[in-house]
Image: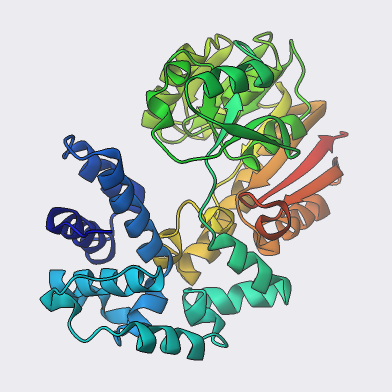
Amino acid sequence: MKLHRPLVNAVAEALAEIFKQGKYADKVIERLLKSNPRWGSRDRSFIAENVYEMVRWWRLLLEIGNWEIGNSHELAEKDFVRLLGVNLILKNEKLPDWEEFEGLSADEIFQQKKQLESERRIIQSIPDWLDEAAEAELGSAWDAEIRALNEPADVVIRANSLKTSPADLKMQLAQAGWETTETSLSPVALVLKRRGNIFQSPLFKKGFFEVQDAGSQCIAPFLRAEPGMRVIDACAGAGGKTLHLAAMMENKGSIIALDTEAWKLEELKRRARRNGVHIVQARPIESSKTIKRLHNSADRLLLDVPCSGLGVLRRNPDAKWKLSSEFLENVKITQASILENYSKMVKVGGQLVYATCSILPSENERQVEKFLASHPGFELLEERKISPAQDGFDGFFMALLERKS
C-alpha cells in the first residue's frame, strides 16, 4: 500500500478535531469526505477505516507511542501522523521513509503490544473508570463484552415490509452488486458482506430499506404493537424504531413520535415520506404538558431512553472517550425520571417497553426493578438482552411491562 500525503494529512486532521476539539468521529469523517468529492472509494475507505481504528485503539496507540492518555490535546499534526504509522504497523503495513515515522520499529511495536496483553484497560483501550465500573457490574463477562465491542460493526439493513420482502430485497441488492446474508436475530435484517455507501443505492432512495443494527431491530417487535393500535414512541429521535413499528402495524392505527429535539423529528418526517409511512404524528416535547395531555391514551408505549451507549461502542468508538462517570450517574437519573413520568401515558391493560443501548445492569434491570417496586400497578412480562459477545451485534436491553391498574 502506497501512502499519499493528502490522505495521511486528512486522517491527522480528523483525529485533531476528535481529540482536541471534542467533535464526533462520524460527523468529522462525513464532513471530510463531503468536502473532498474527488477522492475515490479507496481513498475514502482509507480515511474512514484508519480514523475509526485509531479512535477505537487510541489508548493502546498512545501507550505504544509513549504519550499519556490525558495529553491528547497537546499532540501536533506530526504526532497524529506518527500514531497513524503505529496503527499501520499493527496492520502489518510497510511505512515509507518519512520523517514522522523515523525510529518506528515493527519488532519493538509488536513486542510492546505483547507486553501489554495482561493490562485490559490498555490492550482493550478503555478509560480506567469505565473498565472499573463495567467490571463491577458485569464481573468476568466484561472481558468478552469489551473484546466484542472493539470489533468493527457490520452494516445491517432492515427491509421495509411496506414496500418489499427480505427475500426480494436480497435479490435486488445482489443484482446491484450488494451481497448480503441473513441473521436469526431479526427476520427482516440483511447484513452487508462489504462496506460501501449503501445510501446511494436507488433501493434506499425508494424507501425499500433503512440502515439499522440487528440488535436494534429486536426492540419494535418486543413491543407487540398490532395494526390499528395507538402507539407512542416517546424518545423517537430520528425515528428508526418508529418506522419499524409503522411497518409492523401495516400502516394502520396511529403512532405519536415524541422527542425533546425538534430537528430530529424533522429527519423522521423525511424518512417517513421515503418509507411510505403515513400513520406517524411527530410532536416535539415542549413541556410536561405535552406528556400530561397523553396520559392514559396509549395501547403501547416505547421508551427508548437516553443511556451511556455502551452497547454501541463498535459503531461509536469515540463515545468511550467522551463518557464520564458523572454523565453515567446523571443519565440514570434521567432514565428513572422518564420511566416515572412517561409511563402514565399507557392505558390500563396497555404495555410499555423500556429499552437502552447499554449493557450495564444499573441502566437496565435495576432501573426496572426500582420502578416496579414503587409502581404495583405495573407487572414485568419479559426481559431480553442482546449481547455483543454472544449475539455478534450491538448491545441492547429491553423490558416489557403491562399496566394492570
> Residue 293: in sight, yes or no?
no
401 vs 65, left or right, is right
Q: Nearer the viewer, residue 137 or 275?
A: 275
Against 404, is 144 above or below? below
Q: Residue at x 27, y 72 (%)?
A: 85
Against 200, is 314 above or below? below
381 vs 178, left or right, is right
- The quadrant the C terminus occupies is top right
Q: Nearer the viewer, residue 42 or 268?
A: 42
Quarter of the view holding residue 42: top left
Q: Nearer the viewer, residue 366 or 184?
A: 184
Q: x, y (%) of residue 124?
A: 52, 74
45 vs 33, left or right, is right
- The quadrant the N terminus occupies is bottom left
329 vs 99, left or right, is right
Q: x, y (%) of residue 350?
A: 80, 27
Q: Residue at x 24, y 39 (%)?
A: 40
Q: x, y (%) of residue 31?
A: 23, 42
What's the image's color scheme? rainbow
Q: Residue at x 45, y 84 (%)?
A: 113
Question: Across the whole image, how many numbered discs are drawn on residues?
Answer: 0
Q: x, y (%) of residue 284?
A: 45, 27
> Residue 176: in sight, yes or no?
yes
